């Protein structure tokens, strides 16, 4: 018994391994999560500045941003496949493959940017198909056309940030992102309102500011990678035009299911918003508040998921299948533990949260507040499932297992969660709480299935076959 207790407490014992793995994930996840939160800060800055242009500009920017993020998130999901690929190369000490994979990540970004930017360029025509106001559609198109030059640099920034995350060195990404917040605010102020001798471009000025910031963030991170003595040896831009078709195919093979999964989740919330619109303005406004709260909480869970993906990938590359399993379970445990925090906040601080978004006067505000409080109560359960499923997804991506999780997400989100919400919320007239309950049910099922899949792949009796199982997903 004494020997067992010593083994658990020892730095080299079972508990010591779990403690070190959890600490490594937290250390890596913290700057990644703060980087994601910095993007929320930039979006908030844009919204505040656009609000000063008037309701018309704010409404046009809302339409534009929904369309832009649809394409941008899809593209980011695709190039996000670079992270587990790089992590496995580093774990296996295949350093020559690191530059090739990163280079093909740049190529993949350029390839996917072509159809995405072509579609964004036709924003007015796309919005017209959905019956949107012509004046708003025209203003949205002017705004997004100004943003288009920053689309590809933004994707290249994602590739470089993934390169640094795979090396467990994400702090430079955080520093550049924080600098980007300040530059974004200054550029918005100058280009939207005509300060510092520049013309007042209005909404288009916000688009140019976003393109400028995306380009700055990419060039800033590229400068760091090129100058850092431990990273410049890769010479990432060396032989840039030399193709590596197997690496490029692997990025698309791993990345396209990730991109589809991201679209499925974005589409789920878009569809839920449309259902809320059938229930009235108050329900839709309350839904917006609840979604924004969940989005902020999600950023930290996403940081944990990315850190878990890196740790699992590096362990698999090194042939340490027990370490890969440990990293996955530690990440999911941290995701679950973190999910309890926003869940408790939504449950016990619901009114205080809604007061941040609404002034507590008027019958309309009171109605929105009441709905938002009820949605946040359901979102408390939603958070536990969401934080667990995103870290489970990260663990599986570390194995480069993306096709089965994509199918699980599609089935859970669209085959279960959304129909549940539509039937109970709209058809049976149980209201917005039922729609949010549908989202929660779908996420709980997805979370359970992803955990079950990781358990199969990391079962101790099959630990020696983990790499083969993961590799078979690529064939």
Image (cartoon, rainbow, N blue to C red):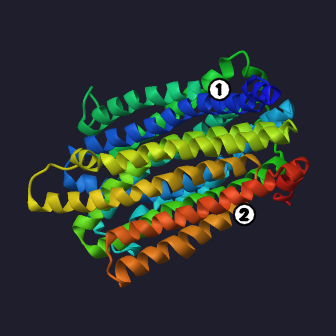
Let me know if residue 72 appears in the view.
no
For the C terminus, the quadrant is: bottom right
- Left or right: where does residue 464 sit relative to residue 430? right
> What residue is disc 2 on?
404
- Indicate which disc, 1 or 2, sits on the residue closer to the N terminus: 1
Find the residue positioned furthest to the front: 1
Q: x, y percentage for residue 382?
A: 46, 57
Whether residue 37 is situated above or below residue 196 in the rendered picture: below
- Left or right: where does residue 12 sit relative to residue 284? right
For the N terminus, the quadrant is: top right
The answer to which of 140 and 407 lies nearer the viewer is 407
Numbered tag placed on residue 169 in the rendering: 1
> CB of mark 1 within 8 Å of CB of mark 2?
no
The answer to which of 357 and 334 lies nearer the viewer is 334
Badge 1 density bin: few <14, some 14–19, many ≥20, Cα 10 Å: some
The answer to which of 279 and 94 lies nearer the viewer is 279
Q: x, y percentage for residue 74?
A: 57, 56
Residue found at x 55% / y 26%? 220
């Amino acid at each position: 018994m004494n020997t067992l207790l010593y083994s658990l407490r020892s730095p080299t014992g079972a508990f010591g391994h779990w403690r070190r793995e959890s600490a490594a994930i937290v250390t890596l996840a913290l700057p990644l999560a703060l980087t994601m939160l910095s993007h929320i800060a930039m979006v908030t800055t844009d919204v505040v500045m656009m609000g000063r242009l008037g309701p018309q500009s704010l409404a046009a920017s809302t339409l534009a941003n929904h369309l832009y993020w649809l394409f941008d998130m899809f593209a980011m999901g695709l190039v996000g496949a670079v992270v587990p690929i790089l992590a496995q190369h580093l774990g296996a000490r295949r350093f020559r493959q690191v530059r090739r994979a990163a280079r093909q990540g740049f190529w993949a970004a350029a390839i996917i940017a072509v159809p995405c930017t072509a579609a964004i360029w036709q924003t007015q025509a796309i919005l017209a198909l959905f019956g949107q106001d012509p004046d708003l559609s025209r203003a949205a198109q002017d705004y997004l056309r100004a943003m288009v030059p920053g689309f590809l640099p933004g994707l290249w920034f994602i590739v470089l940030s993934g390169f640094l995350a795979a090396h467990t060195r994400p702090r430079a990404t955080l520093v550049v992102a924080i600098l980007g917040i300040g530059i974004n605010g200054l550029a918005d102020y100058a280009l939207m309102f005509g300060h510092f001798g520049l013309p007042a471009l209005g909404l288009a000025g916000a688009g140019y500011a976003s393109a400028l910031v995306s380009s700055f963030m990419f060039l800033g991170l590229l400068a760091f990678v090129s100058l850092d003595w431990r990273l410049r040896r890769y010479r990432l831009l060396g032989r840039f035009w030399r193709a590596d078709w197997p690496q490029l195919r692997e990025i698309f093979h791993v990345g396209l299911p990730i991109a589809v999964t991201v679209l499925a989740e974005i589409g789920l919330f878009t569809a839920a918003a449309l259902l809320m619109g059938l229930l009235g303005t108050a329900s839709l406004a309350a839904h917006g508040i609840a979604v924004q709260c969940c989005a902020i909480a999600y950023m930290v869970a996403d940081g944990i998921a990315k850190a878990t993906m890196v740790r699992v990938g590096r362990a698999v590359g090194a042939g340490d299948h027990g370490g890969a399993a440990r990293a996955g379970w530690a990440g999911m445990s941290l995701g679950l533990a973190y999910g309890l925090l926003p869940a408790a906040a939504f449950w016990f601080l619901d009114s205080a949260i809604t007061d941040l978004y609404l002034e507590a006067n008027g019958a309309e505000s009171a109605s929105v507040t009441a709905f938002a409080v009820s949605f946040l109560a359901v979102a408390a359960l939603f958070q536990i499932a969401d934080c667990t499923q995103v870290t489970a997804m990260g663990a599986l991506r570390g194995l480069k297992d993306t096709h089965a999780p994509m199918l699980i997400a599609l089935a859970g989100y669209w085959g279960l969660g959304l129909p549940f919400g539509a039937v109970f919320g709209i058809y049976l007239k149980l209201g917005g709480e039922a729609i949010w309950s549908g989202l929660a049910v779908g996420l709980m099922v997805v979370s359970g299935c992803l955990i079950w899949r990781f358990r199969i792949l990391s079962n101790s009796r099959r630990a020696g076959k983990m790499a083969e199982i993961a590799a078979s997903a690529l064939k």
